[in-house]
Image (spheres, grey):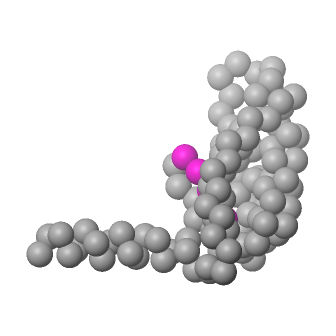
């Protein structure tokens, strides 16, 4: 499965604070998990089985919780049993389709 998620603290009590330190703590947990992952400006996507992916997301969410009194978590999942390597495979197929349309 692939899960794209975004996690951020709120209720820090400090006007104008950036959330980059909290997000960095979450992304470090994802990267240290050993699961395939990709982070962009909006989401971190992680690939693995249900239990291991959600364990990592829970730990990342808990880490962000240390930065505020509330945590916002957004998830989007692609659950496709029996398929692995989709974190890059989907993009590779898209690029091939774009190339085919160009020419």
User: Which residue range is magenta in the image?
Assistant: 42-47
Image quadrant where residue 54 sits: bottom right
Q: Position of residue 36 (x, y in %)?
A: 65, 74
Relative to residue 100, is residue 68 drawn left or right? right
Q: Examine the rendered structure and indicate whether residue 27 appears above or below residue 70.
A: below
Question: What count of labels does the image hold?
Answer: 0
For the point 43% across and 70% down, the residue is 91
Q: Position of residue 23 (x, y in %)?
A: 70, 47
Q: Nearer the viewer, residue 91 or 20?
A: 91
Where in the figure is residue 101, as x and y percent of width and height? 18, 69
Q: Residue at x 55, y 71 (%)?
A: 87
- Looking at the rendered image, the quarter that the N terminus falls into is bottom right
98 or 14: nearer the viewer: 98
Q: Residue at x 48, y 77 (%)?
A: 89
Q: Is residue 29 visible?
A: yes
Q: On screen, 58 above or below 19?
A: below
Q: Of 74 and 1, which appears nearest the observer? A: 1
Q: Is residue 16 above or below residue 3?
A: above
- Give coordinates of residue 32: x percent, y percent: 77, 70
State the image quarter where residue 16 is shown.
Answer: top right
Classified by dominant secondary structure, the portion drawn in magenta counts as strand
Whether 74 is among the magenta residues is no
Q: Is residue 98 left or right of residue 19?
A: left
Work out whether residue 32 can be spotted.
Answer: no
Picture residue at 71% right of the left edge, 68% below the top? 31
């Amino acid at each position: 499965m692939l899960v794209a998620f975004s996690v951020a603290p709120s209720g820090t009590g400090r006007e104008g604070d950036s959330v980059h330190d909290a997000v960095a703590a979450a992304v470090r947990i994802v990267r240290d998990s050993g699961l395939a992952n990709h982070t962009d400006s909006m989401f971190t996507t992680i690939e693995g089985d249900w239990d291991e992916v959600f364990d990592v997301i829970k730990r990342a969410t808990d880490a962000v919780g240390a930065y505020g009194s509330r945590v916002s978590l957004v998830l989007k999942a692609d659950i496709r049993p029996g398929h692995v390597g989709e974190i890059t495979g989907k993009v590779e197929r898209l690029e091939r389709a774009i190339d085919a349309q160009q020419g």
